[in-house]
Image (cartoon, rainbow, N blue to C red):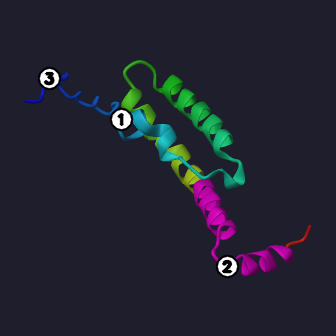
Amino acid sequence: GGGGGPPPRTPAPPPARPRAGPAGGAPAAHAMTPNLGQGACTALLDAEALTRAVATAGPGGLPGALRAYDAERRRSAQRVALGSRTLHRFMTARRPALRDALVGLLPG
């Protein structure tokens, strides 16, 4: 018969994903396309706001600090992400002639 070889290998499980939410996914909450070049700047502003919120809350105040950080940064970061995504869609449009004509109208 057959079957003299080694048993088939079981694939490794996928790596664990970080928990969603402010504690586990702050960078992912502000993921954005690179079109405006603001990803690193947004990350630095997030880090500063989170550091300040945690320092202000003190020991045991992490849940409140995370809420304060989220309230301070979410709207601004989402606006930057939307602007970057909109620019990406415009620059990758399926009608390059229209895009190029509109870009030609810009001052500069």
Assess disc 3: are there few (<14), some (14-19) or many (≥20) residues with their C-alpha within 10 Å of its C-alpha: few
Q: Which residue matches tag 3?
A: 4
The structure residue drawn at horizontal position 46% and vertical position 26%, both measured from the top left corner, is 57
Which secondary structure lies at badge 3?
Answer: loop
Is residue 74 visible from the viewing direction of this image? yes
Q: Which residue matches tag 2?
A: 95
For the residues labelled 1 and 2, the Cα–Cα distance comes to 38 Å
Q: Which residue matches tag 1?
A: 17
Q: Give yes or no for residue 15 being in the magenta stretch.
A: no
Give the amino acid type for the residue marked by disc 3 in the picture: Gly
Of the two numbered discs 3 and 1 in the rendering, the one whose residue sits closer to the viewer = 3
Viewed as shown, does residue 76 lie left or right of 102? left
Question: Residue at the front extreme?
Answer: 1
Q: Position of residue 51 (x, y in %)?
A: 55, 27
98 lies above or below 68: below
Q: Position of residue 31 (x, y in %)?
A: 54, 47
For the residues labelled 2 and 3, the Cα–Cα distance comes to 59 Å
Which secondary structure lies at badge 2?
Answer: loop
Which part of the image, by quadrant, shows the N terminus? top left
Q: Which residues are magenta?
A: 79-104
Relative depth, front residue between 47 and 62:
47
Of the two numbered discs 1 and 2 in the rendering, the one whose residue sits closer to the viewer = 2
Relative depth, front residue between 45 and 3:
3
Relative depth, front residue between 64 and 22:
22
77 lies above or below 87: above
Give the amino acid type for the residue marked by disc 2 in the picture: Arg
The structure residue drawn at horizontal position 51% and vertical position 39%, both measured from the top left corner, is 27
Relative depth, front residue between 69 and 79:
79
For the residues labelled 3 and 1, the Cα–Cα distance comes to 38 Å
Give the amino acid type for the residue marked by disc 1 in the picture: Arg
